[in-house]
Amino acid sequence: MSSDVTNLYAEVQQFYAMQMQRLDRVDAEGYAATFTEDAEFIHSPGQPGSHGRDGITGDVYKVAEQFETDPQQRRHWFNMVNLEPSDDGRITATIYCLVVKNRAGQKPEFVSCVVHDILARVDGELLTQYRRVEYDPRDV
Amino acid sequence: MSSDVTNLYAEVQQFYAMQMQRLDRVDAEGYAATFTEDAEFIHSPGQPGSHGRDGITGDVYKVAEQFETDPQQRRHWFNMVNLEPSDDGRITATIYCLVVKNRAGQKPEFVSCVVHDILARVDGELLTQYRRVEYDPRDV
Amino acid sequence: MSSDVTNLYAEVQQFYAMQMQRLDRVDAEGYAATFTEDAEFIHSPGQPGSHGRDGITGDVYKVAEQFETDPQQRRHWFNMVNLEPSDDGRITATIYCLVVKNRAGQKPEFVSCVVHDILARVDGELLTQYRRVEYDPRDV
């Protein structure tokens, strides 16, 4: 493997660690800033996605509202990062995600999903341009 | 650390992400192709292992048969990848693995194990030459 | 990202895999050797920390004593490694940690926490100089 590709791999891992730690501390603006201005975010298959940083910021606050009646610390684990660089410089990433929901007095609750990202570089900075979340079968 | 070693680290992580995503979508031939032609795969201590790509392909289909009566989406999480390159160019890898079994109407089920791999490079391509799975104590 | 930074990222991941695999096989001295001589380790907020390699070795043996009456194989999963190199050469690392406790006849038990590390390089070798563990809300 070329060192360009392996450097990219570490950069993407560092990017996801930073991005999802922002989400988990409900830094909505900081999280939205890791997406491109024209980003599309499809949370659930078959439902309309969110668009742009304002849309993503709004989504974070909407989820955080639930925490007022159901207090919890979420941790988003991204792993098994599978990258396919494309010729136009963008990167297709297929990532396993475990959402760990931690509540006082309870065992952690887990949700397993797969995240489909397209990453783009804007002024040298890696950003998510497209994200689609696909949930594994679960108890809902 | 030399950049050779750190490049290898990213390459191995990318390899495992690709390899195990193939397994989890029951791409048996694609999964088997990530092993060397002479690979040995020991699933359970004390039991005979599988040999070669045909043996590994057969194992994947055998496991997938269970999914007909017990539908589930498995996700193999590899993490805590500990690499020890050896002088002959092969790499010993000790990896923590969580198997996440996702079924409709149920919470995820977890199995914790340690994967002992020997990776070899064939015509420049990284492949698994030997795999031994060691299960942690569990409810069976 | 510069290749120095991405090389560091892989080096830190390899370091954590090696460090925590030593802990999980109760290699107390080997684990303590991954900390600096003057290391501080704060296990629980508001409680006094451990100091130096002897202090850390003692902690490992103290935890292992519990395993005599409650046999288990622990696996420490570090992930979502977020690194911030500082000007003095030290590295601030914020890491998600899942402790997986595996017991015969039982499902795995999980504890979610965040590890705050300061890593330093001593004679070229990466070591943990400071560690503080912050637990997520849980059933205790």
Image (tube, coloured by chain):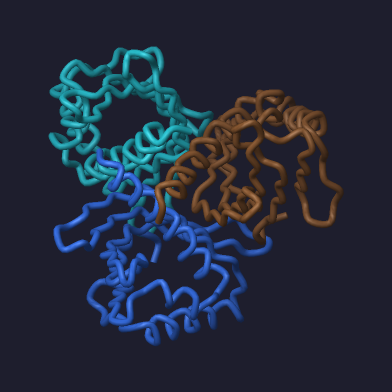
Chain colours: A cyan, B brown, C blue
Residue A138 visible from this viewpoint: yes
Percent position of residue C11, x then y: 39, 54
Residue B113 seen anywhere in this rendered image of the structure: no
| Residue nearest the viewer, comparing C131 with C11 | C11
Q: Quadrant of the C terminus of chain C?
A: bottom left
Q: Residue at x 32, y 18 (%)?
A: A89
Pick the residue in front: A78 or B65. A78
Q: Nearer the viewer, residue C133 or B3?
A: B3
Q: Residue at x 57, y 40 (%)?
A: B76
- Counting from the top left corner in percent of width and height, residue A134 is at 44, 24
**Residue C138, image quadrant:** bottom left
Q: Is residue A118 above or below residue A76?
A: above
Query: Residue C64: where, in percent of width, then height?
Result: 53, 79
Residue B50: % across, % down: 82, 40
Count of residue discs = 0
Image-based side of B45 in relation to B93, left or right: right
Relative vertical location of residue A16 with respect to residue A105 in this rendering, above or below: above
Give the residue displayed 40% in from the left and 61% down from the top: C139
